[in-house]
Image (spheres, helix red, strand yellow):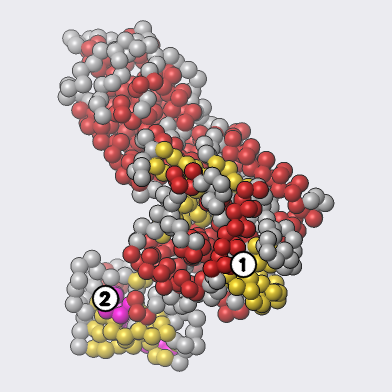
Amino acid sequence: MNEKRFMITTPIYYTSGSLHIGHCYTTVAADAIARYKRQNGYDVYFLTGSDEHGQKVEREAAKVNKTPKEYVDEITNSFKDVWKLLDISYDGYVRTTDDYHKETVQKIFKKLYDKGDIYKSEYEGHYCTPCESFWLERQLKENCCPDCGRQTELVREESYFFRLSNYADRLIKHIKEHPEFIQPASRANEMLNNFLLPGLEDLCVSRTTFKWGIPVDFDSKHVVYVWLDALANYISKLGYLSDDETLFQKYWPASVQLVGKEIVRFHTIIWPIMLMALDIPLPKQVFGHGWLVLEGGKMSKSKGNVIDPITLINRYGKDAVRYFLLREVPFGSDGVFSNASLVNRINIDLANNLGNLLSRTVAMIEKYFEGNIPKSDVSSDLGKDLRSFALSLPKTVDANMNALKIPEALQSVWVLIDMCNKFIDETKPWVLAKGENEGDIETLGNVLYHLAECLRFVAVLIAPFLPDTASAMFEQLGVDSDLTTPNSLTEFGGLKVGLAVKKGDAIFPRIDAKKELEELEKLFPSDSEAKEEKKAEEIAKEIPEITYDDFAKLDLRLALITECEEVKKSRSLLKLTLKVGNETRTVVSGIKSFYAPDDLVGKTVVLVANLAPKKLCGIESHGMILCASNSDDTVLSALTTLAPMDDGLKVR
Ligand code: MSP
């Protein structure tokens, strides 16, 4: 197989409303990765699309008096418009209403049925229509969907079932043997502990109470469950089980499948089991990224707080929106969208730091050297740091991109931009231009050459993220096309002396922040109620400063977990037996949804040993173990030491 082949996918988007800026986040990230790989010589297939079936779509279409097909056609066109505005370079766009897709899904269903992996029975349980998810009674949270918190419907109907349970052990083994399969690693633990290790139930994979889906061809009163239908997109578009499997043979398995954190479960349990049952290799990686949230919480149509990407693109241009999305959200965690953070990123990173650097450099070359790149000495002491940092950058960017650390990749390029700005302040070209000392003009040429060459490095490196900006920079610097590729970054000094620069418009005009924020507040009012709530929470959480004496009151100890069992009556508690030096302790901890008892036995953790005892579910707990967790408690890890240490030792 050609090692330089790369397939990346985004989820396919529900056609039950318009896209908001949060949706654009996944696709822009996938686009940047796809462009980066292409730029570095990979043969890339980038797949996206729309998810057009299901009860939700059927109901939404009926509400506006349209047939489901009319409804999804319109919405899919509107999606494609957004992708065009954002310059998304997909190679394939799949619609689940396309004929080839429907045929593949029917063939997959039949194949699994013939193999005995799909069987007919009766389903009785809960269904969350907005999430299109089945839930068991015990999985509901206060009688509502544990994912979105909305009311579920009780359904009872004849259904086909997929024997997920047959493949659970194989999947657990795969996840444990391939730590790169589910990333970030915390999501793998979440899947193992919350779903796989407690035992998988067979999955209901057909519905009979509505029509808008792909019919099971050998039993047409059933339509295929929308998630089975949707997941198959990743291979149907490649021609799997069709007359022409060329693309499938060429690109599958996918290198990276990007998905939002709430749908990691479908992509790392149902999807790999479908593939195992079909005897197809699993994707090399499923990456669960975080959400772009508003200050008051998640964006959602029902809260009426969605940010429309088209408005933002029209106001600031697509590259500014792409930059914000790629730079602001640490890949893997949530990132906050606020009008102020957007305007700041545009003004500081783009207009000031990058835009000004380019326009000043080009203007000075025009003013002092008649617009031609001046002669330089790229072995001089002057600019030594710039040169070595610029030359090290492609490697840094590559390492970050391979780990899907997109903000870090961009940030490293901005370090070079900052160094260049500092270089101008230090060398003061306007003073050199007076030529008061011998060699000043030569030095000036050398300074400007270094700046222009660094800007060329920057343009090559940001091209996958900000394609139009890179082109505009090449144009202003007068760079030939052979100097726009990563291959041209192995040496500093590629920029040819004498090339004509060409001043153009500011690549990112500065925004009047005060005026703009007022206007944005009218367009996207910040959710004041949510803000108030958040403020109240923060105040409640405000923690006073303490002295060392206060800290010394804590008796923190290393403790070895010798036994661990579930507290049967509780959803969240585990009972731990700890060895703390010569002492044995019982501690009850609310970490059941993150760890199976066996995962913990033999581990050393940090214990608050002098916490007053407390009864939890009838068991007296003598202390508390320390854990780190995110704000919504969806990710958690117990603390331990970097090197193995004896239990009983004091932590201070
Ligand atoms: N149709 C399913 C996916 C099927 S894939 C076989 C679906 N669609 S969706 O339209 O609801 O979501 C698509 C993607 O957008 C998901 O990965 C989801 O996490 C992402 N996002 C939706 N809102 C988001 C934010 N606010 N921030 C970041 N990503 C967000 O799920």
Q: Residue furthest top?
A: 370
Q: At numbered mark 2, what does the secondary structure look like: helix, strand or loop?
A: strand
Point out the tag, 1 or 2, that comes first from the N-terminus.
Answer: 1
Residue 19 image position (x, y, % from top left): 63, 47
> What residue type is disc 1 on?
Val
**Residue 608 colored in magenta in the image:** yes
Q: Do the residues labelled 1 and 2 touch (CB within 8 Å)?
A: no
Check disc 2 and report the residue beneath it: 604
Question: Residue 637: which quarter of the image?
Answer: bottom left
Disc 1 crowd, CA 10 A, few/some/many (<14, 14-19, 20+) = many
Check disc 1 and report the residue beneath it: 205
Image height of 510 relative to 533, above or below: above
Q: Which residue lies furthest to the right in this view?
A: 65
Quadrant in which the N terminus appears: top left
Quadrant in which the C terminus appears: bottom left
In magenta, the rendered stretch is: 600-615
Residue 15 image position (x, y, % from top left): 67, 50
Image height of 545 relative to 95, above or below: below
Residue 517: tell me if it is visible. Answer: no
